[in-house]
């Protein structure tokens, strides 16, 4: 049976990113993202619904988010779902989280409100703030999970 596990989210950080390092030296960041959805109800009135998502980032991606982002900053995240279970005081608990593989910063560092202003993205090992074509950019391993083997899809395979 085939399966596919990809998540694409765009929202605002609900808190400042929390960075820590494992004994191996690998960086890990925990972030919260608020994703808004607007739809009409049965009466034709608009309803705003917010979904709060916990996201774990690894390696250089985690460091970039902690360096450039703070609470309220808009962020685009691509990753995969992960189901976690644990036990607290004899009670079994579980949570569905996202493990982020790629991020894109939206807006500028100084003014997190407003769209379109300069952004930048971090994909598969290099943080890019310039509009240089992807094949000209040096790729470095990120140390975390990457669905495209640390390199990303070739430009000729992208359907748009």
Image (cartoon, rainbow, N blue to C red):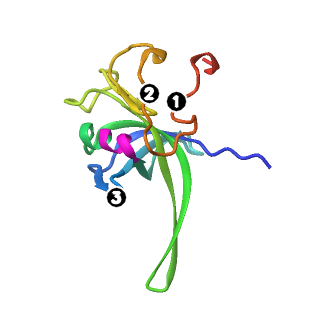
Are the residues flagged by discs 2 and 1 in contact, CB closer than 8 Å?
A: yes
Residue where numbered disc 1 is placed: 151
The magenta segment? 58-64
Left or right: where 57 falls relative to 97: left
Left or right: where 55 falls relative to 19: right
- Label 3, residues with CA under 10 Å away: few <14, some 14-19, many ≥20: few
Residue where numbered disc 3 is placed: 22
- Label 1, residues with CA under 10 Å away: few <14, some 14-19, many ≥20: some
Left or right: where 93 falls relative to 126: right
Residue 122 position, x and y percent, is 39, 31
Residue where numbered disc 2 is placed: 139
Q: Is residue 58 above or below residue 122?
A: below
Give the residue at the far right of this rendering. 1
Q: CA distance from mark 2 to mark 1?
A: 7 Å
Question: Does dot 1 land on a helix, a strand or a loop?
Answer: loop
Q: Earlier in the sequence, mark 3 or mark 2?
A: 3
Residue 117 position, x and y percent, is 30, 21
Q: Residue 108 sits in which quadrant? A: top left
Q: CA distance from mark 3 to mark 1?
A: 25 Å
At 49% across and 51% down in the image, what residue appears?
Answer: 98
Residue 111 position, x and y percent, is 21, 29
- Pick the residue in front: 10 or 20: 20
Q: Which secondary structure is most common in the magenta stretch?
A: helix
């Amino acid at each position: 049976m085939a399966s596919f596990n990809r998540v694409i989210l765009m929202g605002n950080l609900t808190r400042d990113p929390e960075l820590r390092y494992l004994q191996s030296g690998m960086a890990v960041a925990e972030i919260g993202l608020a994703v808004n959805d607007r739809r009409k109800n049965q009466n034709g009135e608009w309803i705003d619904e917010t979904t709060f998502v916990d996201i774990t980032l690894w390696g250089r991606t985690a460091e970039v988010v902690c360096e450039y982002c703070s609470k309220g900053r808009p962020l685009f995240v691509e990753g995969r779902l992960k189901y976690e279970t644990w036990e607290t005081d004899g009670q079994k608990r579980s949570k569905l989280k996202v493990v982020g593989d790629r991020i894109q910063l939206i807006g500028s560092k100084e003014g997190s409100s407003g769209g379109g202003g300069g952004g930048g993205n971090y994909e598969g090992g290099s943080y890019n703030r310039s509009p240089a074509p992807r094949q000209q950019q040096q790729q470095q391993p990120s140390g975390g999970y990457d669905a495209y083997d640390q390199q990303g899809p070739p430009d000729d395979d992208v359907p748009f």
